[in-house]
Image (spheres, rainbow, N blue to C red):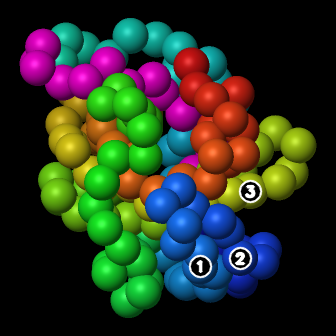
Amino acid sequence: MGEASGSVRGPSSFSGGASWTSQVLPGNLCTVNMDLLRSGWSQAPVPEMPRQRPSYRRVQAPIYHRPTSWFAQGLPRRSAGAPQDGVRSYSDDALKPGRLLEMDVYLPDGCLFTALVLVEWCDPLPRGVPARFDVGMKLVQIAPADKVRLDSVLG
């Protein structure tokens, strides 16, 4: 996993009227996502998952996730939209269901945006695949414009 640090551009306006800025803290850059995207493997079906899981679409862009800042911990944990508003991702890190994370999505045009997500599941994948876990995350807070941008990179 690569290390990343820096700061995210300006204030982000979230649904519900809350506004905040986020400093990118040291954490894990999900290089597995980038490798999978380059290899085309992310298009392959994942081994059968339990049927009660929401049918979230997979992020087809590099992402970075980290524990939330102290400020984000105080934001209400409500869905950012419809019940199906969530994403799936591959990860080498086991993520605990119920954990609130800040997720940076790096778009193909070089821009990035941040959303708050709640880990819903983290299922191990079989040996021999490029990642260790399949992770489902519910969108908790995302700016409306960023939701449109996110939809453009979901498979």
The kind of secondary structure element at disc 2 is loop
Q: Name the residue under label 3.
A: 112
Callout 2 touching callout 1 (CB < 8 Å) = yes
Q: Against 121, is 67 above or below? A: below
Q: What residue type is labelled 1?
A: Trp
Q: How crowded is mark 1: few (under 14 residues within 10 Å), some or many (20 or more)?
A: few
Q: Mark 2 points at which residue?
A: 11
Q: Residue at x 71, y 83 (%)?
A: 6
Inspect the magenta stretch and tell me whether residue 29 lies in it.
no
List x then y, in percent, for residue 18.
52, 72
Q: Name the residue under label 1.
A: 20
Q: Distance between the residues labelled 1 and 3?
A: 15 Å
Name the chief secondary structure element in magenta.
loop
User: Magenta segment range?
Assistant: 50-64
Q: How crowded is mark 3: few (under 14 residues within 10 Å), some or many (20 or more)?
A: some
Q: Which residue is drawn at 71% across and 76% down?
A: 11
Q: Residue at x 82, y 54 (%)?
A: 111
Query: Can residue 21 be seen?
Result: yes
The kind of secondary structure element at disc 3 is strand
As drawn, is 27 to the left or to the right of 121?
right
* Residue 93 lies in quadrant: bottom left
